[in-house]
Amino acid sequence: MKSFVSLLPKQQFIGLTLALSLSLLLGPFATSAQAAQQRDVEGIAAIVNDQVISLFDVDQRVDLFFATSGIEKSPEMTERMRAQVLRSLVDEKLQLQEAERVEISIAAKEVEDRMKVLATEGKMTLEGIKKFLSEKNIETTSLEQQLRAELAWSQFVRRSFGGRVKVGDQEIEEQYNKAVRAVNQTRYLVSEILLNLDNFSNEAQVAQLSGEIVKQLQSGVAFGAVARQFSIAPTAARGGQLGWVTADQLDRRLASVVQNMQAGQVSSPIPTNAGLYIIALADKRAGGNDPSKNQFDVLSLTFPKETKASKIDRFIADFKTCRRAQQSAKKSKISAKRTGLRELGQLTRQMAGAVGNLEAGQLANPLSTAQGIELYAVCDRKDDLGIEISRDQISDNIFSQRVAMMARRHLRDLRRDAVVEYR
C-alpha cells in the first residue's frame, strides 16, 4: 500500500490535513502498527478528571498522524515525542470537558460535514477517507474524535472570548499608517510554525523535537501540513501562512533571522517569549511597485516576410480594438494570437521589451523576426500596486491574535486545575 503522501499531489495532501491541528501532531507515538495491536486495548495511558485516555486511543492517534503528515516514522522520533504528545491528548480531553461544561455539544452530522470538507479538499470522497484509514488499520472514530474536539474548542473560544476582544479604530489606524510608511521597505513572504513550550518537560526535548521538524521540512515535507498539525499560532489553519510582511512587523528576533534568509529556506528554531518559532521564507521583494509584475494582455500579429510595409501601415492606422484587429487578421489570413493577462516577466523577452512601456490600446513598432513581421498590440494592462493594505485585514489579524492568546491562557489554567494521572 502506498503512503498517503504518495497518493495525493502536495497541494491536495495539504488540503486534506487542514483540520488535523496541534493535538493530532502531538498525539503519542507507537513504534509500529504491530506494536499497537499487541497493546492491551483496555490499558490506560492517562486519566483526566476521571476520564480515561487508553493506550489504544494513543496508538491510533499516532498512526493517524504518521499516515497523514508526511513525517518519516522512526523509532527515534517516536520515543522522543511520546511523553510530550500524550500531554496534548490530555489537552484535548480538557477542551472537550470545558466545552461540555458550557453545554456545547457537537452532533455527529457536524463531524461528518467536516470530514466531507476534508475529502473535497483532498480530491477524495468521504468513503475514500474511510477506506484509506481502514487500510492503515486506523479506526474512523480516531479522526472523528479529533475533529469533534477541534469543533467544540473552536465554538467555546468564540463564545467565551470573541465578545471580550475589542479592536479600536485608533489602533487599526496606527497599524495601517505603520504599514503604509513601510511600503517602500523590503517585503518577505513568510510562513510560521509556533511550538508550545508547555508541551515539553525540558530544554533537551525541545531541541530534539524542533530539530527533527526542521530536518523533515528541509528534506521536502510540506511546511503547510506540518504547520496545521504542530503550530499553535493563529495562522495554523492557513498552513502557517503569515503573508507579505516587513521586518518591523515581526518580532525583532524573527526579523533578524528573516532578513538573512534566502527564498526557499527554512530557519533553525528561534526562541521567543511566545514559544519556539520555525520560519519559512517563500519569497522576498524590494519595496515599491515591481514593474515585472505588471500584467499585459497582448495581441501578437505575424505578417509574412514578403508583406509590403504599406499594408502593415494601413493595418496600424485602422487599428481600433484587439477584437476588430483579430477579425481583420482572420480575413487577411494573418496569424493572430492573444496572451491573455500575463505578468510582464512571463512574456517572451522580445514581447516584453516591445510592450513594457505601452498602455492599453497602443501598438509597438513592427519587428522583423524569423517567423515574419511581428506586430504587438496591448489589449489590456493592469499595473502592480505592490502589497495591498486593508484595514479590515489588520483588524482581523489583531482580533485573531488576541483571541488565540486568551485561549492559550485559558487552556493553561485548565491544565493547572485539572486532576491528571499518568500511568
Image: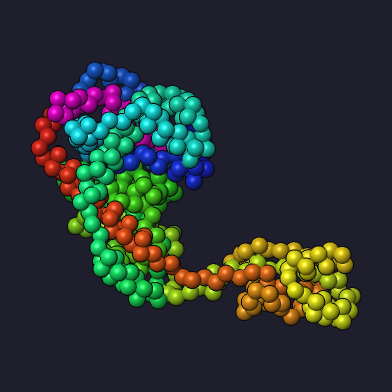
Residue 408 percent coordinates (x, y): 21, 47
In terms of image quadrants, where is residue 32?
Answer: top left
Q: For residue 50: magenta? A: yes
Q: How is the image coloured?
A: rainbow
Residue nearest the observer in this picture, 109 or 408: 109
Asked whether the viewer can see residue 156, the reply is yes
User: Which span is picked out in magenta?
Assistant: 45-68
Residue 65 falls left or right of residue 301 = left
Residue nearest the observer in this picture, 106 or 404: 106
Residue 336 falls left or right of residue 96 = right
In terms of image quadrants, where is residue 266?
Answer: bottom left
Image point (39%, 28%), residue name? 109
Residue 420 falls left or right of residue 255 = left
Is residue 368 placed above or below 342 in the rendered structure?
below
Q: Number of marks in the image?
A: 0
Residue 355 falls left or right of residue 12 = right
Residue 213 percent coordinates (x, y): 33, 47
Asked whether the viewer can see residue 195, the reply is no
Residue nearest the observer in this picture, 255 or 359: 359
Image point (46%, 70%), residue name? 386
Q: Quarter holding the C terminus?
A: top left
Q: For residue 285: magenta? A: no
Image point (33%, 62%), residue name? 394
Residue 122 percent coordinates (x, y): 49, 39
Residue 330 percent coordinates (x, y): 84, 63
Image point (57%, 69%), residue name? 382
